[in-house]
Amino acid sequence: MGAVLAAVLGVSLMGCSSTGGKRAEERAAKEASAGRSAVNTPRWTFAMVTHSGDGDTFWDIVQKGAQQAADKDNINFLYTHNDEGQQQAELVQTAIDKKVDGLIVSLAKPDSMKAVVAKAVKAGIPVITVNSGSAESKQFGALTHIGQDESIAGEAVGDELDARGHKKVLCVLHEQGNVGHEQRCAGAKKTFDGTLQNLYVDGTNMPDVQASIEAKLDSDRSIDAVLTLGAPFAAAAVKAKQTAGSKAEIDTFDLNASVATGLANKSLGFAVDQQPYLQGYEAVDLLWLHRFNQNVLGGGRPVLTGPQIITADDADELAEYTNRGTR
């Protein structure tokens, strides 16, 4: 620890000179971009276990942020995922058995995760929750939660739908039992002055998703907006709209390169960005800060990374970042 503090003090002293400070920043940036650590703290192991299904681009962005923070912080980073609650809990137990130095979990299905998160805390493993489970995070013993408040995000969507003059909206839920998804649609319904109806689909079967949305749009021509809860499902909704001959606007939660393109060409109305890269990056960085310096952010409240409403006006500016996979 003495060596670590000496190194930190050395960097601080360099910062007293504008030249020295600039050189230190440039060196740290160069090392991080090359995948090398910018610090000389011990090589701790952090595990992230999420509820992602296979091929979910949102979680690719979360993982990228986490990995880049791990490279900077000299962390051995392990990532696993499963969209079934019990299997996700088993992956967390595996991480506990490996005696990891820090744990990051999502709580989309909190009932399945409660007991195993308690085991991690009891074993002395610091836990940070991300993305889902802001309401349960503190209760389960996590240091903090990083993500967006899903109810607040939903309410922001309801306000945006009103501002666009919509009257009847279809909210498409693609993962059964995901409490965050329910909160998004409920939040939108709370502030939306029109009618909002939920449609449950099998998110693991994209043709089924498209067919279900298409059937709904075909049978109810009064639907003037479709809200999907994940970027990959926005494209399916656009195809369903075209096949049904509907004039409904397609809007979505989350942002990726495909969504940015859709915003730019007006096939999508707006997107709700919760900055997944930031969720992964900050989770790893905060665990490192806690191990190194016992720092905690949030003061007992979630650290919010969203929501931000993204429209066509923002698409060009964000294209550089969505194309490289960090937004």
Image (cartoon, rainbow, N blue to C red):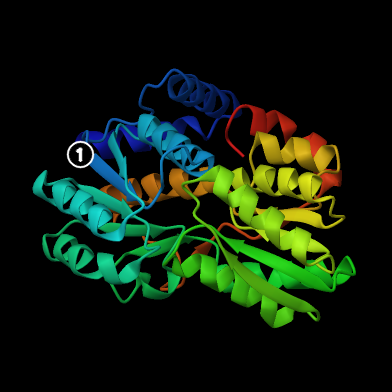
On the rendered image, what quadrant is the C terminus found in? top right
**Which amino acid, by three-letter code, is at mark 1?**
Gly
Comparing 124 with 273, the one in front is: 273
Percent across and percent down for residue 140 are 28, 72
Residue at x 26% of width, y 44% of height: 47
Q: Residue 215's x, y, as percent? A: 69, 58
Which residue does the image show at 11% across and 43% down from the upper left? 98
As helix, strand or loop, the secondary structure at mark 1 comes to: helix
Please give the residue where the numbered disc 1 appears in the rendered image: 2
Name the residue located 46 percent from the left edge and 72 percent from the top edge. 301
Residue 243 placement: quadrant: top right
| Figure quadrant of residue 295 | bottom left
Q: Is residue 265 visible?
A: yes
Q: Position of residue 297 (x, y in %)?
A: 43, 62
Q: Nearer the viewer, residue 326 or 206?
A: 206
User: How many marks are shown on the rendered structure?
Assistant: 1
Residue 126 to residue 289: above or below = below
Residue 272 visible in image:
no
Q: Residue pushed farthest right?
A: 165
Horizontal arrangement in the rendering, residue 231 relative to residue 175 (left or right): right
Residue 254 higher or lower than 218, as above or below: above
Q: Residues within 10 Å of mark 1 (few under 14, many from 20)?
A: few
On the image, which quarter does residue 299 sit in? bottom left
Q: Quadrant of the N terminus?
A: top left
- Identify which residue, 137 or 303, lies in the foreground: 137
Q: Is residue 217 left or right of residue 206?
A: right
Q: Is residue 30 left or right of residue 71?
A: right
Position of 74 relative to 139 (above/below): above
